[in-house]
Amino acid sequence: MNRLAGKRALITGAASGIGEAAVHRFREEGAQVFAVDRAAGEGVTQIDITAPGAPEEIAAKAKAALGGLDILVNNAGLGTWAKFDDTTDELWDRMFAVNSRAPFQLVRACLPMLKESKAGRIINTGSVMSERTDKGLVAYTASKHAIAGMTRGLALEFGPLGITVNFVMPGAIATGMTRESFEDPKVRAIWEKKSPLRRIAEPIEIAHGMLFLASDDASFITGTGLLIDGGLTLRT
Ligand SMILES: NC(=O)c1ccc[n+]([C@@H]2O[C@H](COP(=O)([O-])OP(=O)(O)OC[C@H]3O[C@@H](n4cnc5c(N)ncnc54)[C@H](O)[C@@H]3O)[C@@H](O)[C@H]2O)c1
């Protein structure tokens, strides 16, 4: 399959979980991918997206490596459970720096390249917590609601430039940020039971959604949040 033949993509959070799966899936479909993460990984350029000047550095390196950019996948994220009393200013700021501010800054840094693309695509990684919430997730929820709002605002402004902007809303997946919790059989069973499919997702199942939004099949979709949660949020 060559659904992304000739496309150039930048994916953050590429050393683990959803991002790693997206890198593999996009490459399988013919894309050239510039992969970024704070952590080390095969073929991954190591940069902390929140470091001063990092978004501009990443955009410049992507341009040098790929010659331009068609798809930006803002996927790197931080997920920390903290009750309200434990939600310090530092935790709040860190959560927003990684989950909301850096994606915004990467959009700004990559915009000149996306404007030059024939069909620019921005795919942000939200969460079911972009529309709902759960206990211990005040800061995370707020930072992921910001992704929903930012996506919709950008979709309005960038439509006339031929750039679509969407976000995915994954449910529960065992990845770097959640693996420890899901190793507890009780916690895993609770989350498995929440989905009518009675399981949590594999990272590749979220990558498939990103691939769809990046492909020509999604040419008229913009400002949308794609729920990939196995029905987790169906119940009221
Ligand atoms: N795992 C879930 O259940 C779940 C559910 C909904 C949404 N998400 C979202 O999916 C996205 C990917 O997370 P994941 O589940 O694959 O977790 P993960 O921990 O496996 O991957 C996240 C990656 O982001 C990288 N990262 C974090 N901070 C960074 C920084 N400052 N600079 C560069 N890279 C940084 C990490 O090193 C890691 O490789 C996140 O935005 C997360 O909020 C995850």
Image (cartoon, rainbow, N blue to C red):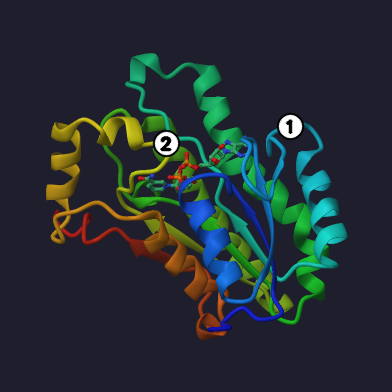
**Eye-nearest disc, 2 or 1:** 2
Rendered position, 78 above or below 92: below
Q: Residue at x 51, y 71 (%)?
A: 211
Q: Is residue 209 left or right of residue 223?
A: left
Q: Residue at x 26, y 31 (%)?
A: 135
Q: Tell me residue 128's x, y (percent).
A: 34, 51
Q: Tell me residue 236's x, y (percent).
A: 14, 53
Rendered position, 88 above or below 167: above
Asked whether mark 1 lies closer than 8 Å to ligand 1, one says yes
Q: Is residue 146 left or right of residue 181?
A: right
Given the image, on which type of amino acid does mark 2 rest? Met
Given the image, on which type of amino acid does mark 1 rest? Ala
Q: Tell me residue 184's x, y (percent).
A: 21, 30
Q: What is the distance, in whole Å, between disc 2 and disc 1 at their CAs?
A: 20 Å
What residue did someone put label 1 on? Answer: 51
Assign a secondary structure to mark 2.
Answer: loop
What residue did someone put label 2 on? Answer: 177
Q: Residue at x 87, y 58 (%)?
A: 64
Asked whether mark 2 lies closer than 8 Å to ligand 1, one says yes
Tag count in the figure? 2
Rendered position, 51 above or below 116: above
Q: Nearer the viewer, residue 72 or 103?
A: 72
Q: Nearer the viewer, residue 173 or 160?
A: 173
Q: Nearer the viewer, residue 28 or 22?
A: 28
Mark 2, other Cα within 10 Å: few <14 / some 14–19 / many ≥20: some
Q: Residue 3 is drawn in which quadrant?
A: bottom right
Q: Is residue 120 left or right of residue 188?
A: right
Q: Residue 115 is drawn in which quadrant?
A: bottom right
Report if the CB atoms under discs 2 and 1 are less than 8 Å apart.
Answer: no
Assign a secondary structure to mark 1.
Answer: loop
